[in-house]
Amino acid sequence: MKLSEIKHQLNTLDNIAFQLPNDELVPNHFHVTEVGKITKHFIDCGGTVRNEEIVNFQLWNAQDYDHRLHPEKLLSIIELSQRILGIDDLDIEVEYQGNTIGKFGLDFDGKNFLLTNKQTDCLAKDQCGIPEEKPKVNLSDLKNESCRASSGCC
């Protein structure tokens, strides 16, 4: 999800809820403790230098059970961050602490913001010898007439 998309959704909501990949909701007394721009400057395994930028939201729970972050407040935090930090319309990554700090993608189902699992990937498969994934085929779908029991090939 891009920053413009969450801003649009926040304008339509009365409350904010974040749902974890296991369908549990982040407790509704969460805080957004950070909105920032993260720049990653790196070299991939194929030798290509890359730069990536994302917007980062950090969600945190305290024992402050009366706290509720309203959509208009989060929208104002996002807009202040954009103005002060010069954040463009970037993809959002969300940090949330379970057993350890997890990094999630963000989606929206019409009601809740969904924290989605992220995966690592090789960015230079063609450079480091990773074969392309072969398509999976069910043997029962093959219609090779020459290998019928009556064909004499076996």
Image (tube, rainbow, N blue to C red):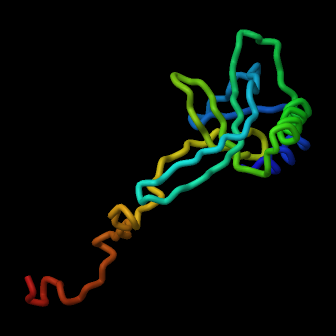
Q: Position of residue 137 (x, y in %)?
A: 34, 70
Q: Nearer the viewer, residue 39 or 152?
A: 39
Q: Nearer the viewer, residue 19 or 46?
A: 46
Please say if 14 is above or below 90.
Answer: above
Q: Position of residue 21 (x, y in %)?
A: 58, 37
Q: Quadrant of residue 58?
A: top right
Q: Nearer the viewer, residue 144 or 122?
A: 122
Q: Is residue 66 left or right of residue 146?
A: right
Q: Residue at x 29, y 72 (%)?
A: 140
Circle count: 0
Q: Residue at x 58, y 47 (%)?
A: 41
Q: Residue at x 48, y 58 (%)?
A: 123
Q: Quadrant of residue 77?
A: top right
Q: Is residue 86 left or right of residue 98?
A: right
Please say if 102 is above or below 143.
Answer: above
Q: Position of residue 136 (x, y in %)?
A: 36, 67
Q: Position of residue 6 (x, y in %)?
A: 80, 45
Q: Quadrant of the C terminus?
A: bottom left
Q: Is residue 123 left or right of residue 41?
A: left
Q: Residue at x 82, y 16 (%)?
A: 67
